[in-house]
Amino acid sequence: MSQQVIHLDFVSLSPAAGPEAREHLLEAASQLATLPHVLSLGAIDAGAGPETRSDFDLVFYFLLPEFTALEPFGTDSRYTGFLQGEIAPRLKAFAGVDVSVDVSLDADLLTGGAYATCVALMAPDETYDWEVREALQAWCDTAAPATSTGGLAVGEKQLYRGAALAFAAAPLSVPRPDASRFRTTLIAGTVRALA
């Protein structure tokens, strides 16, 4: 069985973008729900929830049916237009990762709950995949009883070795994984279902 893939785009907005930039980007991203391979689409808005120490302002997440869907998704002119025409002019910092998930997800999982948090792990090249997987699972376990999912990075060499998402009805305060082993990116806030 083919594994589903979650594509994540982390966005920090330029101070010059103004407070309306978030809403504009969320609305623009919602137009991507019609892309052929997108099963689910949403965003975590770090600025709309309780005070956090988030590393980015927004994270957009796209659930795709399998690894082979990444190329047509990533090269679709509507998606590249969103990155270049909508995000880039308002951008301070950007990162992304594609992760495979070990179990088949119901698309509703990624749009359920009012709050969410996302963690992405950077690790030295000599770090084994099982170590990354173990750290992500421990993080997901810490997020319980929130609904969580994650996996290892797939595709060409990426900045992050893996990532996970957790969703809940109440604000989540999940600590970062062990900083002595990994450098982390963490985003927490409210969830906006976009598809």
Image: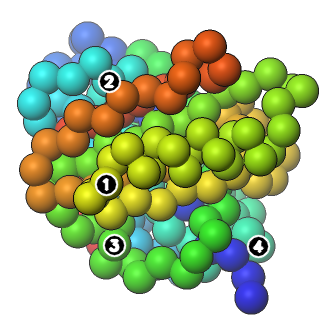
- Of label 3 and label 4, which has the lower sequence position? 4
Q: Which residue is mark 2?
A: 54
Q: Quadrant of the N terminus?
A: bottom right
Give the number of the mark in front: 1 or 4.
Answer: 1
Name the element at disc 4: helix
The kind of residue tagged 1 is Ala
Q: Are marks 2 and 4 in contact (CB under 8 Å)?
A: no
- Could you say where residue 155 lies in the image, as x and y percent from the top left? 80, 53
Residue 56, image quadrant: top left
What is the C-alpha distance between the residues marked 1 and 4? 31 Å
Q: Which residue is mark 3?
A: 109
Pointer 3: residues within 10 angstroms few (<14), some, or many (20+)? some
Q: Quadrant of the C terminus?
A: bottom left
From the viewer's side, name the closer residue of 25 and 70: 70
From the viewer's side, name the closer residue of 28 and 145: 145
The kind of residue tagged 3 is Leu
Residue found at x 28% / y 18%: 53
From the viewer's side, name the closer residue of 172 and 75: 172
What is the C-alpha distance between the residues marked 1 and 2? 20 Å
- Could you say where residue 106 lies in the image, as x and y percent from the top left? 41, 82
Pointer 1: residues within 10 angstroms few (<14), some, or many (20+)? some
Q: Which mark is residue 144?
A: 1
Q: Are marks 3 and 4 in contact (CB under 8 Å)?
A: no
What is the C-alpha distance between the residues marked 2 and 3? 22 Å
